Amino acid sequence: MERMADVFRKTARLIARGEIEGDLAKAAGTNTDGDAQKALDVIADEAFMAALAGSDVRYYASEEQDSVVELNGQGGLGLAIDPLDGSSNIDTNVSIGAIFGIYPAGPDGDATFLRPGRELIAAGYAIYGPQCSVVLTVGDGILKFVLDPETQEFVQVASPAGVGIDSAEYAINASNYRHWTKPVRAYVDDLVAGAEGPRGRNFNLRWVASLVAETHRILTRGGIFLYPSDAREGYAHGRLRLVYECAPIAFLVEAAGGMASNGSDPILDIVPDELHARSPLVFGGVDKVMRVAGYHELPDEEISALFGNRGLFRA
């Protein structure tokens, strides 16, 4: 963590300097799944690998690498990381960050990461925004540290305690409504119906398109995040990476007292079938995530009725 913290410091400074350092948002090729890489994606990935060389990290699995990289044959840990999450927001001065999960090293690289997220021993994220903060867990509660811009030291502060708040905020990319499955549309329809709908209250939509920013808000003041699968090509199994994004965030959210699922099943119970496997992701307060799962269990005639009373939720 000390080595990673040094990368967080340097990356925060690089981002704060913005265009002074050059065009950090310029195209830098594509990753293994064909997603566009930004210059800062590559810079961050190389910085983490360099910092962790010779550490106890044996296997390094990154969203920016095609396969697992062995850093130290004697190491006892495996690090799964999205070195720069939210890179589409680099040039807009919106919060971006890094997401990481730490496993005990397995017999080989793939075996280290192709396992249920419940076998993580630590997970967290760094968020680069008005503050540079690190939020992490080793499985029991969460810790928060803020980078002091004067001393360049990470100072522990009060842990976020908002995941269980009965917030009226929800996060989803509403522009994809027409592509969603019926249960997801029904769930959002009921939120949009507000006080006049079956939920009997008004809700507020939030969407930053930066997973670390969405997570930070929900851990701080509650709500729910949804990135479902949909009918578009390449989205049938969701879009977020199970190993680098979904499992670490789920491990962190559950440690904070929340819940994370793929819409129906707990994220931490899913075994990825390949290193860059994707998954839908729903996380937030336990009652909110369970309600989404309930919509997936309703009969078709109930989820098809716009703003109708959902049998599962009648008094």
Image: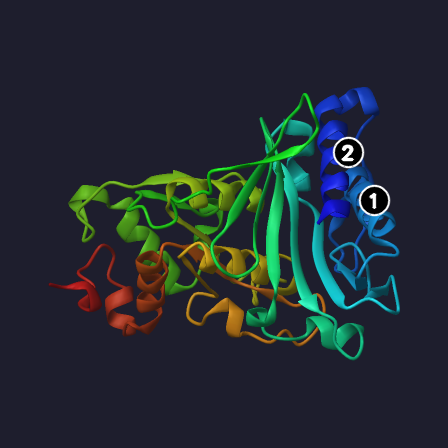
Residue found 60% across the figure and 56% down from its top: 123
Q: Name the residue under label 2.
A: 10
Disc 1 secondary structure class:
helix
Q: What residue type is labelled 1?
A: Ala
Q: Residue 7 occupies which quadrant of the picture?
A: top right
Q: What SS does tag 2 mark?
A: helix
Residues under numbered marks 1 and 2 in contact, where contact means CB atoms less than 8 Å apart: yes
**Residue at image location 82% in from the left, 52% down from the top:** 52
Residue in the foreground of this view, choosing between 311 and 257: 257
Image quadrant assignment for residue 294: bottom left
Q: In this view, does 45 lie above or below 306?
A: above
- Residue 185 image point, x, y percent: 36, 57
Q: As rendered, which of 218 and 205 lies closer to the eye?
A: 218
Q: In the displayed structure, does residue 80 sit left or right of residue 210?
A: right
User: Which residue is the extreme one toward the left?
Assistant: 315
Q: Is residue 239 visible?
A: no
Sequence-first disc among 1 and 2: 2
Relative height, residue 85 to residue 181 (above, below): above
Q: Distance between the residues labelled 1 and 2?
A: 9 Å
Residue 122 pos. (x, y %): 61, 59
Direction from residue 85 to residue 178 in the image, left or right? left
Give the farthest residue toward the bottom. 107
Residue at (88, 56) in percent of width and height: 54
Residue of label 1: 47
